[in-house]
Image (cartoon, grey):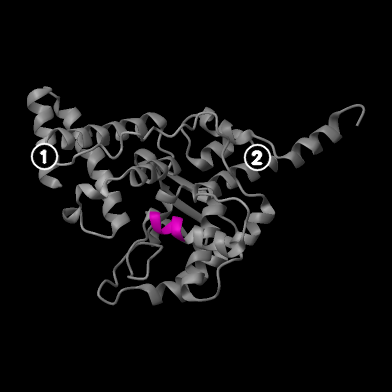
Amino acid sequence: MINQVEGFLNKLRIEKSASKLTIMSYRTDLNQFFDFLADNYKVEKSQITHEMITHQVVRQYLAMLQDNDFKRTSIARKLASIRSFVKYLCREGIISGNPIAAVSTPKQDKRLPKFLYPEEMEILLNAPDDSHLGIRDKAILETLYATGIRVSELVNLDLQDVDLEEELIRVWGKGSKERIVPFGKMAKFSLLKYIDEARPKLINTKNKQENALFLNKNGTRLSDRSIRNILNKYLDATALQQKISPHAIRHSFATHLLNNGADLRSVQELLGHIKLSTTQIYTHLTKENIKAIYTDTHPRR
C-alpha cells in the first residue's frame, strides 16, 4: 500500500496543487491509520493490503480516536483523509467499490460520558488475579483510576516517570505538555508489587534496557489496543452491566472527584484539559447526588 499512498500524494500535489502542509497532513493521517491497521491485523505496515480497509475497521479506528480524546474536528479530518485515499483507489481501479462510503463521523457533542459507580469501580479493580499478568493488570487499572490519565499517556509512561516515594507521576499529554499527577496509597501498593514482582518476569532477556513502565508478554511496551483488551477481559469476568471503553475510567475519576466536592479548576488541572469547558462535561450528577442535594436544600423535603 506504500506505493499507492505515494501515488495518491503525488496526484494531490500535481492535479490539486496541494501545499506541502496539506501533503504532510494527509501523510500523517494515513500513517496513523496504517499503524492502527498493522496493530489490528498483527502485520508489518509493508504487509497491509486494501482488503484490510473495511467499514468495521474504520469505525473501530474512529472509536479509538474518540477514546483517546481527539477533538471531533481532528477525527473528521482524519476520516476525510482516509476517504480521499479510498476514492483514489477506486478511481485507479485498485478496488472495485468503496467499502467505507457509509462511514460517518462519530457524534459526541451532546453525549454524557459513561462512568462506573464507586462500587462498580471497586469490583473492576479487584478482578485481576495474583499471576504476574494479573498483578500488571491491577497496577494498570489502579493507575488509570488513581490518576485519570488517558490510555495513550499510560502506555507512554517510562519507569523514571513514576516517583513512588512522593506518589507522583510525570505525564506527557497532548502537544507534549508535561504535567504532574498525584496518586494514592492503593495505586502505590499495586505499582510497587508490579515493579518488584511482575515486571521482572515480563522483561525480554534480549532487551533488558526496556524503559516502558507497562510491558506486554513479549517484554515490550503495551499498546492502546492491549489496554482495551485487558479492560474487556475483566468486564466480562465481573459481568458488570455496561460495556465501557478504557476512557470511561478517566470519566469515573473525574465524576467521583467532583461528586465528592473537588473544584472544577483542580480537576481540569489533573485531567490536563486546556479549556475549562472541556472539564464541565463531567459536572453531570448521579441520581444519588441529585436526591441528596434535594433532601438537603428543599424546604418541603
Name the one closer to the observer, 288 or 220.
288
* Dot label at residue 6: 1
Instruction: Please determine whether, in this image, residue 133 is positioned above or below residue 172.
Output: below
Categorize mark 1 by other alpha carbons within 10 Å: few (<14), some (14-19), many (20+).
few
Magenta residue span: 225-229
Does 227 appear in magenta? yes
User: Which quarter of the figure has residue 174?
Assistant: top left
Q: Which marked residue is nearer to the observer: mark 1 or mark 2?
A: 1
Residue 198, given in percent of the width and then of the height, sits at: 45, 74
Asked if the magenta segment contains residue 5, the reply would be no
Q: Is residue 243 left or right of residue 15?
A: right
Question: Is 166 on the left-hand or right-hand side of 79?
Answer: right
Quick one: SS at disc 2?
helix
> Is residue 166 shown to the viewer in this render?
no
- Amino acid type shown at disc 2: Leu
Q: Which SS type dominates the magenta stretch? A: helix
Q: Quadrant of the C terminus?
A: top right
